[in-house]
Structures are given as structure tokens and as C-alpha cells.
Amino acid sequence: MMKLSTRGRYAMRIMVYLAMQNSDVPCRKQEVADAESISADYVEQILIRLKAAGLVTSHRGARGGFSLTQAPGAVTVADVLAATEGPLSLVSCSDEACQRETVCVTQHIWRAAENALSEVFSGTTIADLAESAAELAKSKSITYDI
């Protein structure tokens, strides 16, 4: 079974968290770590990758931290996963020349599956996920007293 690593999944959570915060005030790695229940060291490792990909920026000083470099609607799940997981590939033969390419009956299935995943990841933005997270938070905050 294909699985995304924790790095990719946590990167998505970090990006959504940053998108939901006041964009005028950078978030410290410890704040992100506490909010998302991820170790601060791991948050830092992921933020370094996201920064290298140009998805977040760091701010120095007493009010320093991290923030998104672009509007959440401009960043897709595909962008974040490319920064943390690398290229999407279900099977090794789909992204390289395969000796069995002319006789392989499963090749079209692998490519179709990769294309479908790519379409979902490219068609979903951090803003979409932040909106879903806000709706989920609202529904969780409803209490019924009897």
C-alpha cells in the first residue's frame, strides 16, 4: 500500500495552521508544534523544507517566526507534497524508461492512478483545507446543555 510519510502529512497540517492565523503576525515553531501536537524539532525540519521550496518565509527577531509566502489559495496540496515528499510516483517504472513498456498491460492503470491523484492534489488549495478546518472547528464548538 502506498502511504505518504508523516513529513508530508504534517507539512499539510502546518500549512493549514499558518493559513488560519493572522498573516500579519508570524507563528513561532513552538506555537505550531503545540497546536498540531508535533515535536518542535520535527516542525522545524519541515519548515526548512517548506522554506526551501518558497512556500513559507522566516522572520527574525523578538516577533519572528514563520508565515506563508503566498495567499493560501495560491498554494496547492501538490505544491506542499512536492516540497516534502518529492515527485508523485506509484510505481518506479512509471517515471523512467521501462523495458516492458510495449508489452505491459498494467502500465496504463498506474499512469491513470497517478494522474487522478495529481488532479486531486493540484485541485485542492491550502485555502480549501483551511476553510474545511474552520467549519470543522465550528461544529466541534457547539455544545448542548441539558
Image (cartoon, rainbow, N blue to C red):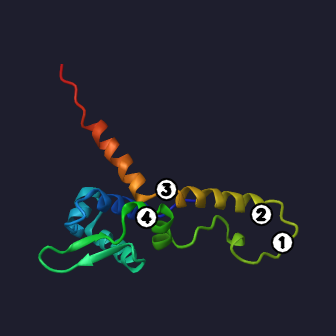
Residue at (36% x, 63% y) in the render: 15
Q: Position of residue 106 (x, y in %)?
A: 79, 60
Compute the Cα span from label 2 to label 4.
Answer: 32 Å
The residue pinned by badge 4 equals 74
Query: Badge 3 is on which residue?
Result: 124
On the image, numbered disc 2 is attached to which residue? 107
In the shown orientation, is residue 110 left or right of residue 77? right
Q: Which comes sooner in the sequence, label 2 or label 4?
A: 4
* Of callouts 3 and 1, the N-terminal one: 1
Label 4 crowd (10 A; few <14 / some 14-19 / many >=20): few
Gap between marks 4 and 3, in whole Å? 10 Å
Other-residue count near label 3 (Cα within 10 Å), few / some / many at <14 / 14–19 / ≥20 = some
Going from the N terminus, do you reach mark 4 or mark 3 first?
A: 4
For marks 2 and 3, give the CA distance.
26 Å
Question: Is residue 56 depicted above or below 120 in this figure?
Answer: below
Q: Tags 3 and 1 in contact by the CB under 8 Å rule? A: no
Q: Amino acid at mark 1?
A: Arg
**Foreground tag (2 vs 4):** 4
Q: Secondary structure at mark 3?
A: loop
